[in-house]
Amino acid sequence: MRILGLESSCDETAAALVEDGTRVLSDIISSQAKVHERFGGVVPELASRHHIVNIMSVLESALDSAGVSLDALDAVAVTRGPGLVGALLVAVQVGKAIAFARDLPLIGVHHLEGHLSAIYLNASSPGAVPGTPHVALLVSGGHTSLIYVKQRGEYLELGATRDDAAGEAFDKVAKLLGLGYPGGAVIDRLAKTGDARALRLPRPMPGKAELNFSFSGIKTWMRNWVSENGVPTGQALADACASFQHAVVLSLVSKTREAVKRAGVTDVQISGGVAANSYLREEMRRAGEEDGFRVFVPPPRYCTDNAAMIAAAGYHRLLKGERSNLDLNAMANLPLASSS
């Protein structure tokens, strides 16, 4: 079964063909990073306009790369939310048009369920994916959540950020340090040669009983430190990156460990753009070795926003007999529990 996935929730225009929910036939992404770089973050109006310009060429490239036509599709899956509503509407309208013209099933997919489905893409064996139930740490530029995955399609949010997402904190601190946008990967690279204990950043919401996150305080602390000391260079810059990254990762890992203990599971998956962070992967695996849980992370390509994960999520919901009507609309705010 071949599913076309379409994604335009933020600043990546993406289309992908996925067979049977796991085998990726094509995966095309057009990034707008250069468009938003000079603003230090995503400008919603610009994002929407660039999605409109890029969506058809991205779709055609995905079909050509997979060597199929629209006639070979079995269904269309689109990200319906959450995200920037103007951006979301682009993929939603294109997906609806294709489904209507070709009389295909349409599946509206929750963006976060897409991230949770990325772990199943190109999985080599059943043992390469987490069993259920398991705990998922979903951490990206717009979202930071701990989710209990009872089974695919059934989720319970255990904790979430009360303010900034971890990925947003990475990008804003990178801007403060003069590292450009997006800056998460740059911080990760520079931190490899830095001293994580050089700066004594506060630990956000340290209580074990609290599974929610907060990263606004760390961001404010770094802003004040730069204001007092200036933008660092050389080794001092590497130390600042390492110290900031350590504080964020410590919060993510410690709360995930507590969630695993409470849930009584043995598998953890990390998903979302920040899952590509090498220090987070390393520290979570170390925690798993100490506490006795296994850690699963998608390849870096499938951690960031992509359409293959949307197709994979859509395939699973299609198997359950779910369909969306042609009045499907984009929703900027959409609880994960409402994904069906």
Image (spheres, grey):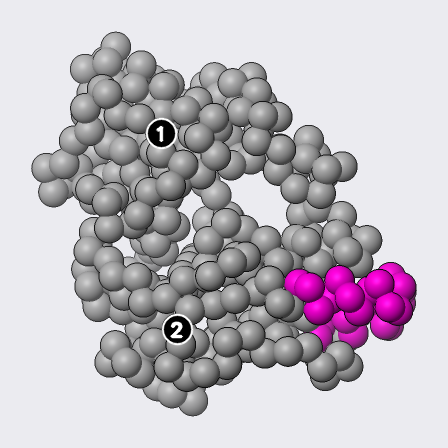
Three-letter residue code for mark 1: Ala
Residue at left offset 33%, top offset 42%: 334
Quadrant hosting residue 7: top left
Helix, strand or loop at label 1? It is: loop
Q: Is residue 329 left or right of residue 36?
A: left
Q: Which residue is mark 1?
A: 330
Q: Quadrant of the C terminus?
A: top left
Q: Is residue 206 magenta?
A: no
Q: Residues within 10 Å of mark 2 (few under 14, many from 20)?
A: many
Q: Image height check: is 182 above or below 215?
A: above
Q: Where 206 sits versus 26, above or below?
A: below
Q: Main secondary structure of the magenta part?
A: helix
Dividing the image into 4 quarters, which one contains the N terminus?
A: top left
Residue occupying image coordinates x 66% and y 63%? 219
Q: Which residue is mark 2?
A: 211
The boundaries of the magenta stretch are 219-243
Q: Amino acid at mark 2?
A: Leu
In the image: residue 296, left or right of residue 192: left
Numbered badge on residue 18: none
Single out the residue that lies furthest toward the top: 101
Residue 171 appears in the figure: yes
Splitting the image into 4 quarters, where does residue 265 fall? Answer: bottom left
Residue at the image position 39 percent from the left and 73 percent from the top: 211
Front position in the image: 206 or 252: 206
Picture coordinates of residue 68, whole percent (x, y): 35, 22
Determine if residue 122 is in view.
Answer: no
